[in-house]
Amino acid sequence: MYEGLHIAGAQLVNEGKIIEADVLIEGEKIKKIEKVSLKTPSNYKRIEANQKYLLPGVIDTHVHFREPGLTWKGSMTTESKAALAGGVTSVIEMPNTVPPTVDYKTLENKYELARSQMLVNFGFYVAATLENLQELHALMLPYVAGVKLFYGSTTGNILFNDPDGLEKLFSLHLPLIVAHAEDERIIRQNTELFRKQIGDDHLQAYHHSLIRSRESCLAATSHLVYLASQFKTRLHLLHISTADEVNFLRLSKSPHITAETCIHYLWFSDKDYQKLGNFIKCNPSIKTTDDRDALRDALKDGVINTLSTDHAPHTCDEKMTSYLRSPSGIPSIQYGLPVMLTLVHEGNFHLIDVVKWMSHQPSEIFRIAERGFIREGYYADLILVDMDSRWKVWPDEILYRCGWSPWVGVELHGKVIATILNGKLVYENGKFLGIKAAKPLEFIRPFE
């Protein structure tokens, strides 16, 4: 076994710059970054980058791996394997599994599963409920990123929108609350209205953006920002999907309130329901091209800070049922970064900014120890990317369990050709090398 790695002749993308550099890795961490060519130390494995781009591994702070309890949709092993192929080296997994992650027992059970099953670095959220408010501080273990607030309903049954409970939750001054922001009252009113006017059998996926409406998003986002501002609580708003929310946040967001959007909101619009139907049904809903453009601009302006996949697998059979029965969620962890590289190629974004949104700022906002940057002394979570590679998404190459993608048949531009995890080369040229190197993430406490 080699003692270290030498990545030679890479275009290193890091902290706002692209420079040609060599990187030496010893053990789990980056030992040296040098702008001139280095001699490969004895017993090091040399990787010829040949001017390809070296990026910090993607930190996806919003994934649903479905284990325990929903493993016909996905598992920690299958979904994290797909993550490695897509350049994701660390994930934070959501609590709406079965049973939901709401107490010490369910959290420790998930942690033990991850230690044996995960192929990427991992952390978790704990869901807030009316019953566990007094336990939440004790549950902020080193591998717990924060508390997930399901202010809008979605997969699982842990909706939390009780007014008194919300005030109590925000008054606890937890390290971080991450929130699904949709107003349940508006959604239920819209659902009943459309069922009466159109009929259950005639509702289609394109109605989703009208039922899970922009009004429901703005109402929830504005209320949660009000609570976070009132109690000076750190809040990270998840999957922002509308221009309305962007405009509101541009005027009202404070330093302790941050926001995320997701890959699918930057690629699809409501025009795509005609072709893809329930396969792009997700919560919040995909909305108009104007919303899509506003989200792209909000990332560039810094109104939105991070970019995730919200990887949410369901089977094809589940998705192909009627609109009301079809579950919401899009599986995308294998393709999130390549989709963004394609948008870079098309001139929508700069590669430097994609690295900021998918690696640097997730590390900073969630205060993840020694990850998310290419720095000496940091963990060597790195990906080598061929920006010139053109390829199409086909079902037989999908690695996550549900086996479908709304990008099937789409030509993407840019591909991950190698993934290094904690100093170990684990994936190269489409092959997994059988090396397990995943570790729990460490979240630095207390938050500043």
Image: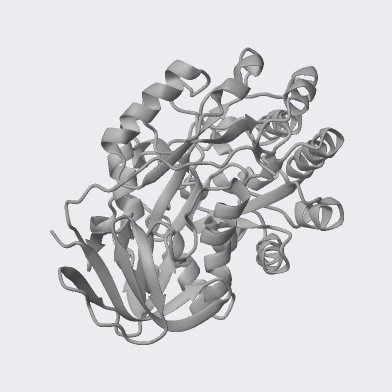
* Residue extending farthest bottom: 36
Residue 307 visible, this angle: yes
In this rendering, would 91 be left or right of 439?
A: right
Q: Say which residue appears at 55% left-offset and 23% top-offset.
A: 139
Give percent across and percent down for residue 200: 58, 31
Residue 261, x across and y down, in percent: 62, 54
Q: Residue furthest top?
A: 131
Q: Residue at x 57, y 65 (%)?
A: 356
Colour setup of the view: one colour
Which of the two residues, 203 or 306, is positioned nearer the viewer here?
A: 306
Residue 271 found in image quarter: bottom right
Residue 206 image point, x, y percent: 59, 49
Answer above or below: position of 444 versus 416.
above
Residue 200 versus residue 101: which sits nearer the camera?
101
Residue at point 48% right, 54% down?
Answer: 370
Q: Where does the image place residue 307, in percent across and percent down from the top left?
A: 57, 56
